[in-house]
C-alpha cells in the first residue's frame, strides 16, 4: 500500500482477504494510537528545494536527548534519530538554497549546547525513498 496511500478500504480488504470493517477498524486503531500517520511523500529535489543535507552529529552523551529535542524544533530539520556509533545523532536538513543550508549549519547548529562535532553530507540525488519496509507492506 506504500505506493498509493489513497487506496480505498474496500480495495485493501479485497487484497488482504478480510472485510472492509476489519480494515477500517485497524486503520482507526493504528491512527488513534499514533502508530500510523498518513502523509504525502515529497521528493524535495523535484519541488525547487535543492539543498538537502544529512548531518551526522557527535553530541555529549549526557546531552543527547536535549540536542535531539532542540534539533526537532527547527522546521528545516526533516528527521532526527539517535544512533549508536561515533556520531550519535543523524538529522536531515532541507533548505531552498545552498546559502540557506550553509547559514543554518554554520550559524544555527553550533548554538545548540552539547554538540561536539558535525559531519555534513549534502545529498545530490534521491534514488530511493521507500516506505514499504514492513513485512506485508507489499500486499
Image (cartoon, rainbow, N blue to C red):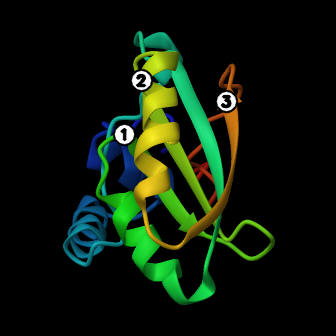
What residue lies at 20% left-to-right and 68% top-to-bottom?
Answer: 28
Q: Does residue 82 appear to the left or right of 22 in the view shown?
A: right
Q: Residues within 10 Å of mark 3 (few under 14, many from 20)?
A: some
Q: Residues within 10 Å of mark 2 (few under 14, many from 20)?
A: some
- Earlier-in-chain disc, 3 versus 1: 1
What is the CA distance from the residue labelled 3 to the residue labelled 1? 14 Å
Image quarter of residue 42? top left
Question: Disc 1, disc 2: CB below 8 Å?
Answer: yes
Q: Does residue 33 appear to the left or right of 13 in the view shown?
A: left
The correct choice, above or below, for 69 with respect to 75 in the image is below
| Residue that protrudes farthest toward the right in the picture | 86
Instruction: Say which mark, if any, is on residue 76.
Output: 1
Q: Residues within 10 Å of mark 1 (few under 14, many from 20)?
A: some
Q: Nearer the viewer, mark 1 or mark 2?
A: 2
Q: Name the residue under label 3.
A: 122
Please, what secondary structure does the residue beneath circle 2 have? Answer: helix
Amino acid at each position: 500500500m506504500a505506493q498509493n496511500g489513497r487506496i480505498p478500504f474496500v480495495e485493501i480488504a479485497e487484497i488482504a482477504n478480510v472485510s472492509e470493517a476489519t480494515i477500517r477498524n485497524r486503520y482507526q486503531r493504528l491512527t488513534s494510537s499514533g502508530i500510523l500517520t498518513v502523509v504525502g511523500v515529497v521528493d524535495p529535489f523535484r519541488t525547487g528545494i535543492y539543498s538537502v543535507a544529512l548531518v551526522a552529529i557527535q553530541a555529549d552523551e549526557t546531552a543527547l536527548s536535549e540536542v535531539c529535542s532542540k534539533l526537532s524544533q527547527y522546521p528545516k530539520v526533516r528527521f532526527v534519530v539517535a544512533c549508536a556509533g561515533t556520531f550519535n545523532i543523524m538529522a536531515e536538513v532541507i533548505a531552498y538554497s545552498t546559502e540557506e543550508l550553509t547559514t543554518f549549519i554554520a550559524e544555527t547548529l553550533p548554538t545548540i549546547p552539547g554538540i561536539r562535532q558535525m559531519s555534513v553530507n549534502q545529498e545530490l540525488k534521491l534514488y530511493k525513498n521507500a516506505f514499504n519496509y514492513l513485512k506485508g507492506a507489499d500486499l
